[in-house]
Image: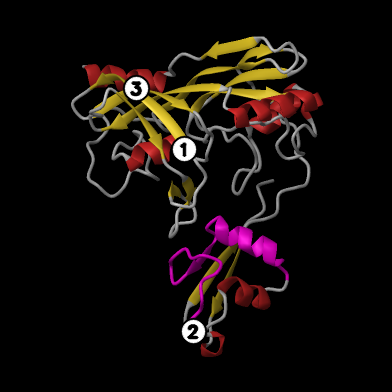
Amino acid sequence: MGEPAAVTRTLSVPAAAAGARLDRWVASQLPELSRARLQALIEQGHLHVDGGVPKASRRLVGGEEIRLEIPPLPPETLAPEAIALTVLFEDDEVLIVDKPVGMVVHPGAGHATGTLAAAVLAHAPATAGVGGPRRPGIVHRLDKDTSGLLVMAKTARAYESLTAQLVARTVTRRYRAVVHGRVKASQGVVDAPIGRHPRDRVRMAVVPRGKRAVTRYAVLERFSQFTDLDVRLETGRTHQIRVHMASLGHPVAGDTLYGGRAVRPALPVALSGLALHAAELAFLHPVTETRMEFASPLPARIEQLLSHLRG
């Protein structure tokens, strides 16, 4: 059986509703949705007003057409799935995996099955309930179209230790990224807050009231129209590298969400996902406090891209 289908509701705003808050008026028209659920749908970009993606606090003027897509609620618990994993290390406390491009880390809208979380739950059933029933063992994430290293917690004490280390910035996360354009500075730091895009709620952006985000980068190799970078995260915001590099005018190769409207050179080879790979990961073991270091070689998709750029 396939996944349950989303339900679409369309509303026409009468003149009498002018001045009302968008979320309050829609909630009054759709009593089957709690206001919290509705606000979450708006935040996730499922509601459109005259084709645009608004804020929940928008004031209505009357005459608007509202379209709301209501995805099915995920089940409260996650079903384990026997999906092959690339395991670099495992003991009673932690599991280090090398995530392939195209795999979603945990269930979400449109991705109920085939997730890394479900695969880990099948591989290590003891992770059930560690960090939450829908995200067992997950302490940090990678985008679907990014590959590379992730550490999973197998116990509650490992989860607490690893999340604390992420907050304290003692976890080392290094990435390889091929970006558009020639990055002039040999190295640099982007210290710019990230939050939801003010007009497109599906995207993130550098915004004044966002959460602090710090990305360090160093040039490894320059090409005529692209640059190969070593990137280190000091914080872990959603889409951080993609947003920060795009803010410099150097979006990650293969990134259609943050690539902008500028006409950019075509990639010399077909690329599956993003030219972004979590290549190195280091942290303190939750129990022994030994420094653990792991590395993942560049996947074929990025090696092929670099080979063509050097050609």
Q: Quick check: 170 above or below 3?
A: above
Q: Earlier in the sequence, mark 2 or mark 1?
A: 2
| In the image: residue 6, left or right of residue 132 | left
Q: Label 2 vs label 3: CA separation?
A: 52 Å
Q: Which residues are magenta?
A: 32-61
Q: Amino acid at mark 1?
A: Gln
Q: Are marks 2 and 1 in contact (CB under 8 Å)?
A: no
List x then y, in percent, for residue 134.
72, 40
Q: Amino acid at mark 3?
A: Ala
Q: CA distance from mark 2 to mark 1?
A: 38 Å
| Residue on which disc 2 sits | 62
Residue 240: image tag: 1
Q: Is residue 155 visible?
A: no
Q: Which mark is residue 122?
A: none
How would you classify the magenta stretch by its main secondary structure? loop
Q: Is residue 40 magenta?
A: yes
For residue 118, what is the image quadrant? top right
For the C terminus, the image quarter is top left
| Disc 1 + disc 3, Cβ < 8 Å | no
- CA gap between label 1 and label 3 equals 16 Å
Could you tell me which residue is drawn at 45 percent across and 58 percent down?
Answer: 198
Q: Which sits earlier in the primary sequence, circle 2 or circle 3?
A: 2
- Residue mark closest to the camera, 2 vs 3: 3
Residue 29: quarter of image: bottom right
Look at discs 2 and 1 and give the one toward the viewer.
1
Q: Residue at x 50, y 15 (%)?
A: 296
Residue located at (73% from left, 33% from top): 136
Q: Identify the element where label 3 is drawn.
A: strand
Task: Identify which residue, 22 or 195, lies in the foreground.
Answer: 195
Residue at the spot of label 3: 218
